[in-house]
Amino acid sequence: NSKFIALATAPSPNGIASFNQNIYQLLLLGDMANGNVLGTINVSAAIKAQVTGTKNFMGDIVDLSLVGNNIIYLASRAGDAFQRAELGSDNTSVTLGSTFNKQVDLLVPNGCQAPIGVVTAHDFSDNKTMYFNCWLSRTMAAVDLASQSVIDDFASATPPSGAEIDINKGRRFDFTGRARWANESWSSCGSCHPDGLSDNMTWQFPAGP
């Protein structure tokens, strides 16, 4: 299979003045054999359409793992969560979630903050164990794919101490989209400013540019 999948964050700075109309998480599909584009999938729009009740819009998707040819697991740094997505045969649509749940929260009750990496077994089985690198909590979360649930979490590095505690809090506030920081994890400060610098765009909001 020569299919490849890339992640992208698409800004719409002069679009509709609404919190959930100005930045989108995309999957870009292509064929490595010939360089052709296979399709583009708007993950944010799929979540809006398919997830009922409280939604986690999976802001700042930073990594993915492909199981087989058509099942993708997406790690959201702003959302502290992961999304299972099954690719449609047309390469332009996804079916979200599983028979157990639509989305999986890694923060509650397991405390995984800012997952930045995800690893699954390189085979066609969707019932293995998946691991998330939780950057800011400095933990590793283990997920049982057969039940789509977190089964373990453990320390992966030494907790911050001294002045580093405040530095780590600053990172947390910059990269989270949970609680007061964003509505339904739509985005985070880091979604537009991953390096803390200007994004060189003028954004339009209800109060003006």
Image: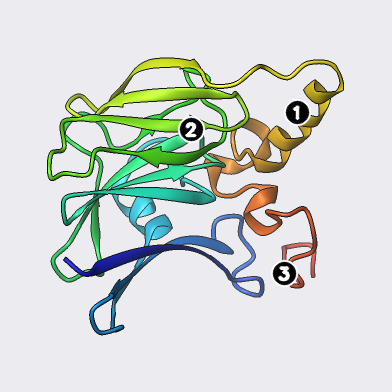
Residue mark closest to the camera, 2 vs 3: 2
Q: Is residue 185 left or right of residue 121?
A: right
Q: Which mark is residue 133?
A: 2
Task: Identify which amino acid the numbered label 2 is placed on.
Answer: Asn
Residue 101, percent across and down? 26, 32
Q: Which mark is residue 204?
A: 3
Residue 84, percent across and down? 28, 43
Q: Earlier in the sequence, mark 2 or mark 3?
A: 2
- The quarter of the picture where residue 89 lies is bottom left
Quadrant location of the N terminus in the rendered image: bottom left
Can residue 109 be seen here?
no
- Circles 1 and 2 in contact, beta carbons < 8 Å: no
- Circles 3 and 1 in contact, beta carbons < 8 Å: no
Disc 1 designates what residue? 169
What is the crowding at mark 1: few (fewer than 14 residues within 10 Å), some, or many (at least 20)?
few
Residue 195, percent across and down? 73, 54
Look at 60% across and 40% down and name the residue there.
177
